[in-house]
Amino acid sequence: MLFLALDRILFSVVTLLIVSVAVFFATAMLPGDTATILLGQAATPEAVAGLRKAMHLDDPAAFRYLHWSFGLLRGDFGRSYANDLPIAQLVGGRLANSLKLAAVTTAFSVPLALLLGITSAMFRGTAYDRSVTFLTIALISVPEFMVATAAVLVFSVYLHWLPALAFANEITTVGQLLRVFAMPVITLTCVVAAQMIRMTRAAVISTLASPYAEMALLKGASRQRIVLRHALPNALGPIVNAMALSLSYLLGGVIIVETIFNYPGIAKLMVDAVATRDLPLIQTCAMIFCVGFLILTTLADIVALVANPRLR
């Protein structure tokens, strides 16, 4: 098991190396010239050339990639092109805000997904199961910007219960916390929990159809005992993997949600960096998203290995 876990970690490291190459060269091919964008259209060619030389934009791409990647290994993310501030300073507060939003969403979505997924599998074929299935399919089919827009229209425009914008830096009480995070969390929970419910239901149903679950039923075990003591532990691997894939969306896939609610997270920071063509900031944000995704999926693989009774 230790060898398998180390193999997963090594695979993640190699994947991160490949992703870093893709991120760097993809951002380098963005249209437009960084120096021209920073200086404006009225800048002289001499000024543009001087700024490009000062920012080492004329250096070979391979040399710039090596300089950037070794800086990441040292913890040096470079400086922003737009305002000449350390990228670590720009990212720090925004990353904390995104992690807060992800934590609150996880606290709501994971228990809800487990409850609905397990109970839907236990009462398969009933009206309750069909209702949950219809709801999850509907939520999966609707894009998050429509859910966010509907939340703003209902809770802010018509009911006046919640603010349309999320000012995360003005939280001092629990009430303000609930008001700020309510609509972003509702939107993200609808998007994230639906897929987790479907995967949890499918994993539990597949395990309930196994011979040992049927034998436990023939011996007189209750349905609740069969699910909690026999089916759920053996279905833990697929469930954890589904949760990891869904929760990884909370760090890198919330660009639309943060933009609609003007939430000061790292995804919103990346959108602003794209507008100013701030290449080091774009690359750093993209790598943070990739690292978060790989950490979650690697942990899910390791948990699935540990939960597998045959490997134990």
Image (spheres, rainbow, N blue to C red):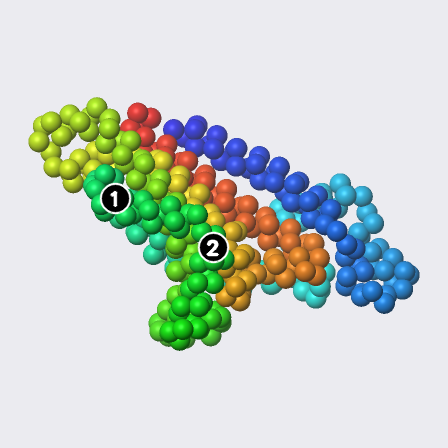
Q: Is residue 141 above or below residue 270?
A: above
- Secondary structure at badge 2 equals helix
The residue located at (37%, 69%) in the rendering is 178
User: Who is closer to the viewer here, 33 or 124?
Assistant: 124
Q: Amino acid at mark 2?
A: Glu
Residue 2, picture quadrant: top left
Neighbour tally class for label 1: few under 14, some 14-19, many 20 plus, Cα within 10 Å: some
The amino acid on which the numbered mark 1 sits, given as a three-letter code, is: Asp
The quarter holding residue 300 reads top left
What is the quadrant of the C terminus in the image? Answer: top left
Q: Residue at x 85, y 67 (%)?
A: 42
The residue that mark 1 highlights is 129
Residue 184, compared with residue 130, is above or below; it is below
Quadrant housing the N terminus: top left
Whole-angstrom CA distance, mark 1 to mark 2, is 24 Å
Measured as percent of width and height from the top left, residue 265 is found at 53, 62
Query: Which of the two residues, 120 or 185, is positioned nearer the viewer here?
Result: 120
Q: Which residue is mark 2?
A: 144
Left/right placement of residue 71 relative to residue 145 reads right
Query: Does the rendering let one see residue 298?
Result: yes
Residue 309, x across and y down, in percent: 29, 28
Secondary structure beneath disc 1?
A: helix
The residue positioned 50% from the left and 66% from the top of the image is 261
